[in-house]
Each structure stands twice: as C-alpha cells, then as structure tokens.
Image: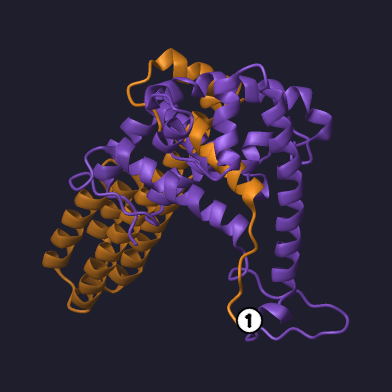
Amino acid sequence: MPELTPDALAKFEKAVTDEAFMERLLSFALRRKRARYWRGIWDGHLPGGKEVADIVQEAIEDVLLGKRAWDPDKHSDLLDFMRSVVNSKISHLQEGAENRKGELAPIANSEDSVDHFDTLPHRNATTAAIQLQEKEDEASNSELILSFYDFLADDKLLQGIVGCMIEGISKRSEIAAALQTKEQEITNADKRLERRCKEFRKAYADKNPFKSSKT
Amino acid sequence: MPDEKPSTPATDAVKALARFLHEPEIENEPREQIQAELKNAGIDTAAVMKTVREKIGQAKSRQRLAAARERRQALLGKVTRLKAMATGGGAKLRAQVKEMLDAEFAGQQEAVVLFRKFEEAKDEDLQTLLDDILLLDETGDEEHRPGS
C-alpha cells in the first residue's frame, strides 16, 4: 500500500504532534489493553513485553508506512481512525497470546521430527504447552479471584459484583438484577472496585504469580 | 474429534472483571484526569511524542527521496533526448541545455560553470558535458539524502 501523500502527511503530523491528541490515544490504548488483557488485573504485562506506548507508536508507523491506509477525506476524524488501528493491534496481541495454536509451528523434540503440515492437536507440542499454561493460569486465577472475593467482605456490593463474575454473570444489567439493585449503582461502583483491586494487588503481591517483575 | 476447549471459569471471571473495570472508554474526560491516568500507568507522553516526531521525520525524508528519484528520472529522459541531438550539434542544443539547467539547477554554482563550458565547447565535447550534468544531478540527490 502506498505511503501517505504529502498533503495527508502534513495533516497527520499536525494532529499526532498535538499533545492532547496523543494523550487521548494513549489513554484509549491503556484502557483497551487493560480491558482485553486480563493479566493486567493482576499487574501482568502484555505478551512480548509490549507496552501501551509501543502499541501506539506501532499504530502510527503503520499509517506512515501505508500498512494502514488513511484517507483524510474518508476518515476526517483521525483520533477515531487511530483508535481503530490501536484496537485491532490489541485484539491481535490478545488473540495471539490466548490462541497461538494456529500461529506457531510445532516444536520439535528429540523423539519426533517436525511435520509442518501436521496440525493435529495430539502431535502439536505447542497446543500441549498452551493447554498446560491455561491449566496453570486457571489454578492461579481461581486462587486469586477467590482471595479477592474474601478481600471485599467489608463491601457487600463489590463482593456481590465479583461473586456474579465468578458465577458467570458479567453484564451490568444482569449483575444489577442478580443483586436486586439499579444498573447505575453497579456502574458507580467501578472506581471503588478498581481502588480495592489495587489494594489487593499490593496486599497479595507475594502470592501473585502474574505480577511482572517490572512493577 | 473436535479440539474441545477446557472450561476455565476462574479465568473467565477475571476477564469479566477486566472488562468491567476498563470498558467502556469515557468520552470527553477532562484532560487533567487523562494525564493523571497516564502518569499512574507510568506512560511518558513526551517520550512517545519524541519517537513519533522522529518517525514523521523519516516519512518526510522518504517522500523527499521519492520526489528526487522522480525528478531524476524525468531529467534522465531529457538528457537522453539531448544526447541524441548532440550528434547533430549546434545552437538549438545549447539553448535547450540552458533551459534545462535553469529549470533543474537554478542557483547552483556548478550549473553556471557547466553552462559556460557548454557555450565554449566544440560539438564533439557536448556529450561529455551532458554526462557531467548527470553527475551534478547525482550529487544533488546525495545532498538531499537524510543524514547528509
């Protein structure tokens, strides 16, 4: 795909070198990353050590190199366009981290030679490794989410919200119905829940297997 | 047999918690709040801006190079035509060379010197001088290359 035209590049430069624009884009990437990548709840990092700044910089470079075509006439709201580029990059990272079966070649071992055309799960060492990782993650998540539930014992609403999630109820309206309260009450509780989550991460840092060494 | 995904209720609950806390994005949030959020997350906006400016600078250089390459191709075409004319020699050729030097190398001291040589040159030397024009153009491209 062709790079930006000189006129489009001038418009692009004017927008992305505006600090307020960049702050909004970074903020979007930060929230989207946190929402999509569950390890962040426990202070974990994105796969490959990628940070929010890396994702935003890559998204900008994709547009500059023409990997993502930006036409100022078609997409006059550049922030909106850049959000979609960032969003797709984060989705790709998340899918790559959680479902690598199709992306990685089978790992060779001493007893089995690699057949790149063989995608059967029982012969695919990567699948086995991912399933093992998922099992370990599940065990660690189980311990942490139940500990978090107990940690919230002094706030019945927050404990109820996390309890719903453990039961598989995740929509705000359904949580409100299960807890016999208004949906707005549930929405209003999210900042409080985030604060408590932060406190929990500190209190349980030594028992948290997902905690990145960087934090 | 289909590859069944094992049930992971605890991981699903953690995913739901992540979405609950961070979606949806809040529109029209005050700038101070966004700045505080980025600061808390350890994101250095100034550093990102610096890298972005560098990447834009590189994109501009690529555009300049592409334009220079295009210009050179056009010039090459002109010189080829002039070379063909040089076999006939004469005043018409000199006039066209002056026009081309004015258009392509206006203000360059080397171009002035070259044209003086053209005016004084014998017809058989014209071809060598046309080769010098190409060399002058290549030097110009070098000067426009990033980092030069």
Residue in view at x 71 percent, y 27 percent: A150
Q: Is residue A177 left or right of residue B78?
A: right
Number of numbered discs visible in the structure rendering:
1
Name the image quarter holding residue A203: top right
Residue in view at x 35 percent, y 56 percent: B66
The residue identified by callout 1 is: A119
Q: Which chain is orange?
A: B
- Residue A29 position in % (x across, y down): 48, 37
Q: Is residue A197 left or right of residue A84?
A: right
- Residue A174 position in % (x across, y down): 42, 38
- Viewer-proximal residue among B48 and A119: A119
- Residue A188 position in % (x across, y down): 44, 20
Query: Relative to residue A60, is residue B25 depicted above or below?
Result: above
What is the chain letter for disc 1? Answer: A
- Residue A83 position in % (x across, y down): 38, 41
Q: Is residue A54 left or right of residue A23?
A: right
Which quadrant is the N terminus of chain B positioned in? bottom right
Query: Relative to residue A49, is residue A192 depicted above or below?
Result: above
Q: Which chain is purple?
A: A
- Viewer-proximal residue among A59 and A98: A98
Q: Disc 1 residue type?
A: Thr
Q: Is residue A53 left or right of residue A213?
A: left
For label 1, the crowd category at 10 Å Cα-Cα, with few meaning under 14, some 14 to 19 and many 20 or more, is: some
Q: Residue furthest right?
A: A110
Name the image quarter holding residue A167: top right
Is there any visible trace of residue A112 in the rendered image?
Answer: yes
